[in-house]
Amino acid sequence: MGEPTQKYSITMPRDVAEAARARGGPSGLSAYVAAAVRRQIERDNLNDLITVCEADHGPITAEEIEAKRDVLRRARQEQGTSDPSAA
């Protein structure tokens, strides 16, 4: 059995709603919007974590970010997956 749900009313630009409805496919608009909101919450939580870490350890440098991206690229290559440039 899935998670309990509740019906909400939201307002959004028509073009955004129509694009989301078109992409929602068989799962529908509600599932598409729920997934998008879930991803945004994950991003917000990561940003909160970064803020806390930077407060404790100082800002993350561009070099540190690139070094981590290199680690991820190598891991993806070893796993045989694609290497998105936006990693």
Image (cartoon, helix red, strand yellow):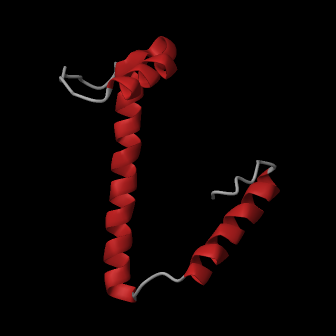
In the picture, the quarter occupied by the C terminus is: bottom right
Against 68, is 76 above or below? Answer: above
As drawn, which residue projects farthest toward the top? 26
Q: Residue at x 63, y 57 (%)?
A: 86
Decide: is 72 above or below 36. below
Q: Nearer the viewer, residue 30 or 10?
A: 10
Specify the quadrant of the image occupied by residue 67: bottom right
Give the camera-side residue of 57 and 16: 16
User: Percent from the top left, x then y, of residue 51?
Assistant: 33, 73
Residue 33 x/y as whole percent: 36, 29
Classify residue 71 as left or right of residue 11. right
Is residue 22 rendered to the left or right of residue 16?
right
Out of 45 and 16, give the one closest to the viewer: 16
- Count of marks, rendered view: 0
**Residue displayed at 39% across by 28% down:** 16
Position of 66 with respect to 3 (left or right) is: right
Horizontal and vertical percent position of residue 11 = 22, 28
The residue lying at 31 percent from left, 65 percent from top is 48
